[in-house]
Each structure stands twice: as C-alpha cells, then as structure tokens.
Amino acid sequence: MRFLIFVCGEGLGHTTRMIPLAKELLDGGHEVFFGSYGYSKRLLEDEGFRVFEAPKEIVLTGSDGVFDLKKSVLETLKNPVVFKIPKIFSILKKSTPDVVLSDVYYTGILCSKFKGLPVCMVTNQANMQEFFQNQGVTLGLLGFLVKLFYNAVFRLVDNIIVPDFPPPKTVCAKNLRFEKKISGKVFYSGPLVRRSESKKKLEFKRPMVLSTIGGFGYRSVLLEKIIEAARLDGKINYTLLLPPGAGKKRFKNTPENIVILDFTENPISLIRDADLVIASGGHSTIMEAVAYATPVISCPDSGQREQENNALGVEALGVGARISYSSRPEDILKTIVKTLGNDALRNKVLEMSKEYDSMIPQYSVRKLLESGG
C-alpha cells in the first residue's frame, strides 16, 4: 500500500511522532510519502523519507513567553488556505496514496476527502475553542467558527488517533472534547515514541537534569533561570540541549555542574537516561519522557492553552510537576529537588512506562491504516 502523511510543521512534536510510525509502515512493506515544510521537512529528509513541499498552513507566534493569539491569527490570514489547495492536489497526484494520514494538517484532510480517499487524523488537541476564550468579541466569534470547522473535520475523517495513553491516564485529556457521535472513531494508540539511538546507558554525573528548553527568543529567559538554579546547588548536574553551535558561544560562564550539548534530532537516549527532564508543555516530549520512565517538569508558554493543559495533566497523573516563566531560580531549584526526591512520583512514572512497554502503538496504528483507515 502507499501512504501519504501530512505533517504540521509548527513545532517538531508532530514530526517526531510520525517518524517511528512511518518506519513501522516501511517495515510492513509499504511505501511512505510525506507532505511537510520548514525544519520538519528537512528533518524528515534527513531521516531518508520522500517528502513533498507542502504549504505552510498556520502561523503560531508569541513573545516573552506568552502565546499571542491575535498576532497568530493575523499572520495566518495573510496567506489564505484557498491558495494552498492546488499544491495539495499536486502532492496527491504525485504520491497516489491508498490512505492519507494527517497530523493536524487540515488542508490535506479536506483535499484528500474531496478526492474520495480514506483519511485518518492524528491529534492531541480537540478543544481549540479554548484558545479564544476571554479574548474579546471578535476572537470569541472566530473561536466559535473554528469549533464548527474542526468538529466538521472530525466527522469527516475515518478515524482519529490520539497518541496518548487511554483514559483515565491520558495526559492531554483536558485538550480533548469530542462529540459523542464520533467517539466510536477515536483510537488511543499510546505514545508514538522514537527508539533510543543507543541501547547502552549513557554515563552522567548523578543526579542529571536534562533541559530541552531552547536558548533563543522568549525561552532564553527561562533557560537563564535554570542556569541560575544550577548555580545555587552544585550537587545537581544539568545537561542543556541547545541549537547547534549556539550554546557554548552564548553561555560562557556556566557553573561546573552544567554540560551544554548541541541539539540532536533524536534526543531519546538523553531523555531515557536523565533523572529528570525540564521541557516546554509540548505533548510529544512529555510522551517521550513518560514512555522512558523519566519524570518531567513542564513549563508551558503562557496563554498557550494546549501546553498549559498538558502541564496540568502531568501534575494530575503524578508523573511530574510544573514551573512558569515567572518562577524564580530558587523556586525552580525547589521544584527540581522536590521532584527528584519524590519516590511516589517516580513509581508512578515507572508504572506508566511499564504500561507503555506492554503496548504496541506503532503496530496498532499500522494495522488500523492497513484496514483502509
């Protein structure tokens, strides 16, 4: 069979969870094509996949750790979706798929269904209207229209795959609000997580806290606070994962208990072997940490309701904690110490990791797709 996977390029989480699924499809003897853009497209090409250039669908923007909904909407509307349709039809014509899979790329879904193709959707966010709450009359009305749109899409697709643990252990539960009429087509696959690059356990001074917070833009403030937290207690060791070649140039006077590594496309080995991960509120990184039994401290972008809800899910399930951009270095250190010393939390994340080990998410999704979506 021939599969075409459309991937939203806003944040790499959509891409990283499709990589292991695509490899599973290849292992099953199928052909796989991707449609994506930006760094997502480059990452997929580096992995050896055949990728078509898809038009950028949405723009997400923010500043000082705060998600800017109004600006994101205005930037998105500068390039209306109607102009992207011919490009999508061209990709469909060139790839001639039997089944289309879309990770939150709506134009691909609509064009594929217009062509009469089976379509499955991957999402961990089914409550987008929440973004528009308390944003004024105009954005509130837009939120209502958005809700009508995504509910129509949910009814249109053949199946909806949620790459998370089944209820009641779903981390992204607060982001899911499906209509009862489509509940039968929702499939909780379990985390779609990449394999570790190395089977051998990495050697670090312990305890080791891994930070996947970037070092640029609005997140640089948070990274600087993490560095100051490290300075306050030299007994805790930190590994900062930063963009290639940038970290060592920018952060020259870091304490001895900090190691700076260039960004790697597959940090699973680091996540697996860390004692604690500090990450944003992105769903995929949280799934990777929990799947490999590593507690997580989440710091969601303020106003980014999806990330905030994911962080609440981490707390509610007892697999980690949360901090904010307003947290002081002292508060961050206190949260790190408390999390590292919490045996109940560590046992809980180990329990969920064992549950993940008993699941076969990629294979289960492959069987679903092989049945024609």
Image: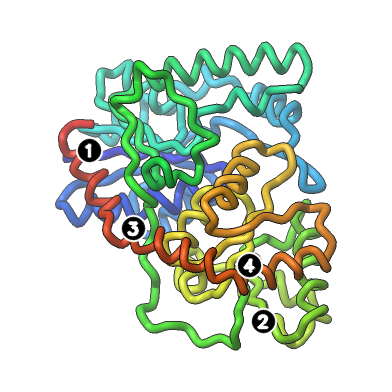
Spot occupied by residue 183 in the image (x, y as percentages of width and height)? 34, 24
The amino acid beneath tag 2 is Asn
**Residue 193, image x, y percentages:** 39, 57
Structural crowding at the residue carrying mark 3, measured as other residues with C-alpha within 10 Å and reported as few (<14), some (14–19) or many (≥20):
few
User: CB atoms at circles 4 and 2 under 8 Å apart?
Assistant: no
Label 2 sits on a secondary structure element that is strand
Q: Which is closer to the viewer, label 1 or label 4?
A: 4
Which residue carries the number 1 mark?
Answer: 369
Q: Is residue 92 visible?
A: no
- Of the residues under marks 3 and 4, which one precedes in the sequence? 4
Circle 1 packing at 10 Å, graded few (<14), some (14-19), many (20+), is many
Of the numbered discs in the image, which one, if any, rests on residue 355? 3
Residue 35 location (% of width, % of height): 40, 39
Residue type at mark 1: give it: Leu
C-alpha distance separating marks 1 and 4: 39 Å
- Identity, as a three-letter code, of the amino acid under mark 3: Glu
Query: In the picture shown, does residue 319 fall above or below 144?
Result: below
Q: Residue at x 24, y 33 (%)?
A: 99
Q: Which residue is mark 2?
A: 237
